[in-house]
Image (tube, rainbow, N blue to C red):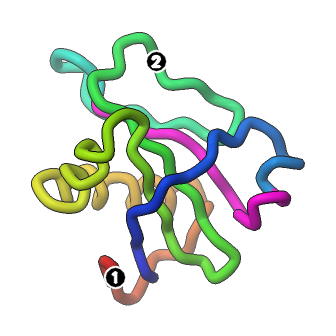
Amino acid sequence: MRIYLTRLPDINTDRDLAKHGYRDYGRFALLRGAAGLWFGSLHSSHPVTTQTGWYWAIDGYGDLAVSARGAGMDGEMLVREHRDILGWLIAELVHRRIISKPKALELV
């Protein structure tokens, strides 16, 4: 599975999902305080307690696209300093059966 940082559109409907060529889409966040991490699907909104939020999408090839909610720096932070959050996201996608457990990961 390839993981790539991009700028994802704000998608809220199944029709938008198909229009942009993604199989699945959602949101995830690092919450303020000791609240931890949060995962949301297509029909969700980031919680009011979001410290830093991102978007995720599975493209037609089964690869994972991630995007910052706010500043582009938030996206860079995710693939550099907070790869643990990216690992958590992949585990959550596997747990929810959105993707199969990847045999290998490639960050591009």
Say left or right for 93 vs 80: right
Pointer 1: what residue?
A: 105
Q: Is the residue 23 above or below the residue 84 in the image?
A: below
Q: Is residue 24 magenta?
A: yes
Say left or right for 45 vs 49: right
Residue at 37% over, 33% down: 70
Residue 47 shows which numbered tag?
A: 2
Residue farthest along the left direction in this orientation: 81
Counting the numbered discs, the total is 2
Give the image quarter of residue 54: top left
Q: Nearer the viewer, residue 96 or 54?
A: 54
Say left or right for 9 vs 92: right
Binning the other alpha carbons within 10 Å of mark 1 as few (below 14), some (14 to 19) or many (20 upward) gives few
Residue farthest along the top direction in this orientation: 48
Q: Nearer the viewer, residue 107 or 104?
A: 107
Element type at mark 2: loop
Binning the other alpha carbons within 10 Å of mark 2 as few (below 14), some (14 to 19) or many (20 upward) gives some
Q: Which residues are magenta?
A: 18-30
Q: Position of residue 82 (x, y in %)?
A: 17, 51
The three-letter code of the residue at mark 1 reads Leu
Element type at mark 1: loop
Cα distance, mark 1 to mark 2? 29 Å
The three-letter code of the residue at mark 2 reads Pro
Q: Position of residue 11 (x, y in %)?
A: 70, 42
Give the image quarter of residue 50: top left
Residue farthest along the bottom direction in this orientation: 103
Residue at 30% over, 77% down: 107
Q: Position of residue 83 (x, y in %)?
A: 20, 59
Say left or right for 40 vs 47: right
Q: Is the residue 9 above or below the residue 47 in the image?
A: below
Residue at 68% over, 57% down: 24
Q: Nearer the viewer, residue 51 or 84?
A: 51
